[in-house]
Amino acid sequence: MGNYSIWILEYSFVKDYHKSGVLYGAHNQGYVKLPYCYALIKGEDHIAMVDVGYNDKDYGKVLGDRFAVENWRSPEAVLAGVGLSPADVDTVFVTHAHFDHFGNVEAFPKATFYIQEREIAKWTWAMSLPDRMRWMMTAVDPGDIVRGLDLARQRRLVTVDGAQSDVLPGIDLHPAFDSHTFGSMWVTVRNDGKSASTDSWVLAGDLVYVFDNVEGPGAAVDAAGPIYVPVGLAVGSQTNLVLATEEMMKQVDYDSHRIIPVHEERLRDRFPSRITADGLRITEVCLAEGETSKVA
């Protein structure tokens, strides 16, 4: 057992999402279920989140309805499923500023938020562009950016410039600039606390949507083995997504089971999980010493 427990908490879902949205080039290949989730990390006297979902009101609701999101539940309801409340969370790592990841900051009154400086700065720039360029803002609620800046006013927003190690003990942040978004990042948990960890987990944000992004579609793509296939949405480039995937894989010694895509319905096939009374899934990636299972 390591220093941290990690759970993936589903808070809503899209029942039928175009497969081409999660897997680049998968045109006319139908639909997949797309869970909307955040990650919970508990240990070392900290309770941290990776992303915070969105709030189903105002423009957040407009975007949720536009993407056909169903069965939305608040952080209070979702965290109660693991015996916690939003007020227990002291740290939030924001992988990127799309509405379903950065749209619920007000629900976490005691947390300090970490985001790449480039991410929030470039979305501020994108908001200033003429309406004819508004494609870039497809999945962004401008109100979230304003609320993020207010966190800075409160001294509860830390803007990170590039990689940063041991933001919490054994937890590192890594940028993937100009990939899925301007300043996306992933979170690495070195669960044994060692610099050269043999027990690392990568929480990939939207740099990886599904297992096929890392492993390729199907058990064996060709004689050369698996192939990285990037996600379908890149404000930057799919090339940068592939390069980021390689860096994530290096950190887990090319064990793709240790890269956790929060939009992947098939997490249930690799990790213990359960469905809550609200019809949403809790997935248990690992348990720290002394922690009780939340899915047993």
Image (spheres, rainbow, N blue to C red):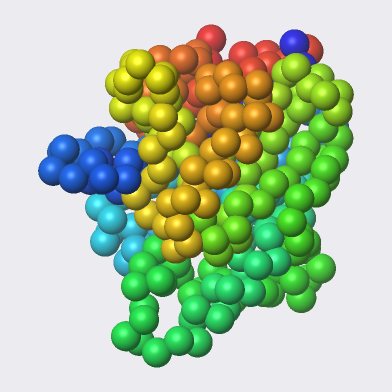
Extreme residue in the front direction: 224
Q: Is residue 270 above or below residue 70?
A: above
Relative to 231, 178 lies left or right: right
State whether residue 256 is above or below residue 234. Answer: above
Q: Nearer the viewer, residue 32 or 221?
A: 221
- Residue drawn at (86%, 28%), measured in percent from left and top? 195
At a point 82% along the width and 32% down the height, the residue shown is 170
List x then y, in percent, for residue 165: 83, 43
Residue 229 x, y percent position in the rendering: 39, 38
Taking the spot 77% from the left edge, 46% from the top edge, the residue there is 90
Residue 100 placement, left or right of 39: left
Which quadrant would the N terminus be assigned to in this image? top right
Count of numbered labels shown in the rendering: 0
x and y percent of residue 260 in the render? 54, 30
| Residue 291 shows in this picture | yes
Residue at image position (13%, 43%) is 28
Q: Is residue 101 left or right of residue 226?
A: right
Would you say residue 285 is visible in this rendering?
Answer: no
Could you tell me residue 4's position as x and y percent? 75, 24
Please identify the quarter of the rendering in which residue 75 is found: top right
Residue closest to the far bottom = 130
Above or below 74: residue 83 = above
